[in-house]
Amino acid sequence: MIPVLTLDGPSGVGKGTVASIVAQKLNWHQLDSGAIYRAFAIAAMDCSIGMDNLDGLLELASKLDLEFKSNSEHAPLSVYLDGVDITTKLRTEKTATIASKYAQLAPLRKVLIIKQKQFQKPPGLVADGRDMGTVVFPDAPFKVFLTADSEERARRRLKQLQVDGNTGNISHTLAKVRKRDERDKNRAHSPLKPAKDALIIDTTNLTIDEVISKVMAIIEV
Ligand code: C5P
């Protein structure tokens, strides 16, 4: 059985940063499942396929031509859709909001989950998202759920937006983060929630290094 570490939690909590550092430390593969939902949203917008055209969305999802490439050791992965680098567009809050709307559709999730499972390769996988521990990798031996209060998450999210070359302000980002979390928590299928066997870490007052140590501790025991 190829081991999986699942890292779930709300937006802006720092899952992506923690996932890439831990994946590098362990030399495991990494799955940024949010990037798949975001890339799908971009593809659906590019083809003007709305929420009401489920058949069209499912066909698009099954043909989604996505590639993740590492350009430098410490930078997040670059994402290519049909061979075109969509990384900057992918990281905008607008793309995230649209992704979270499509992410409510259960049949669509089913197709995208097939792609996510393909990331489970030796020697191991670090997978971050909303339902990694509950739905996609329920048998994972290592499960973590990260939380932080919404103001802190909005600050982190804004910083990330700026690093990625996007813009925003704190009150706007806070409102967007809260709205997206509400949608992700309250949807009928695969809502954002901790797996029963997940270690819950409140990161509000922790540094990245402190969070990493707590995560590594459950793998190294
Ligand atoms: O993690 P990220 O912010 O990139 O995710 C964007 C959106 O994709 C989330 O707000 C959520 O609606 C959706 N998503 C999901 N399940 C996942 C990962 C992301 O529904 N495993």
Image (spheres, grey):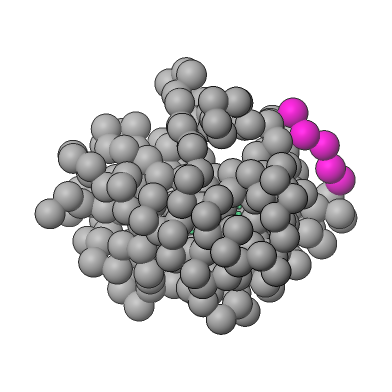
Asked if the stretch drawn in magenta spans residue 27, the answer is: no
**Mark count:** 0
**Image vertical order of residue 179 relative to residue 28, above or below:** below
Task: Quadrant for residue 1, please give it.
Answer: bottom left
Asked if the stretch drawn in magenta spans residue 168, the answer is: yes
Judge from the rendering whether residue 63 lies leftward or rightward of residue 124; answer left or right: right
Question: Residue 121 versus residue 24: which sits nearer the camera?
Answer: 121
Task: Quadrant for residue 200, please give it.
Answer: bottom left
Q: Position of residue 82 (x, y in %)?
A: 55, 31
Judge from the rendering whether residue 61 lies leftward or rightward of residue 30; answer left or right: right
What is the magenta segment's predominant secondary structure? loop
Q: Residue shown at 51%/72% (left/top)?
A: 106
Residue 119 seen in render: yes
Q: Residue shown at 29%/68% (left/top)?
A: 138
In which of the image's four quarters is ligand 1 placed?
bottom right
**Image vertical order of residue 148 relative to residue 118, above or below:** below
Judge from the rendering whether residue 96 lies leftward or rightward of residue 109; answer left or right: right
Q: Residue shown at 44%/72% (left/top)?
A: 194
Question: Residue 47 versus residue 17: which sits nearer the camera?
Answer: 47
Q: Position of residue 15 (x, y in %)?
A: 50, 50
Q: Position of residue 160 (x, y in %)?
A: 67, 38
Query: Quadrant location of the C terminus?
Result: bottom left
Single out the residue that lies furthest toward the top. 72
Q: Position of residue 56 (x, y in %)?
A: 60, 58
Single out the residue that lies furthest toward the left. 1
Question: Residue 34 versus residue 200: which sits nearer the camera?
Answer: 34
Residue 203 seen in render: no
Q: Residue shown at 17%/50% (left/top)?
A: 2
Span colored in magenta: 165-169
Question: Residue 37 versus residue 149: which sits nearer the camera?
Answer: 37
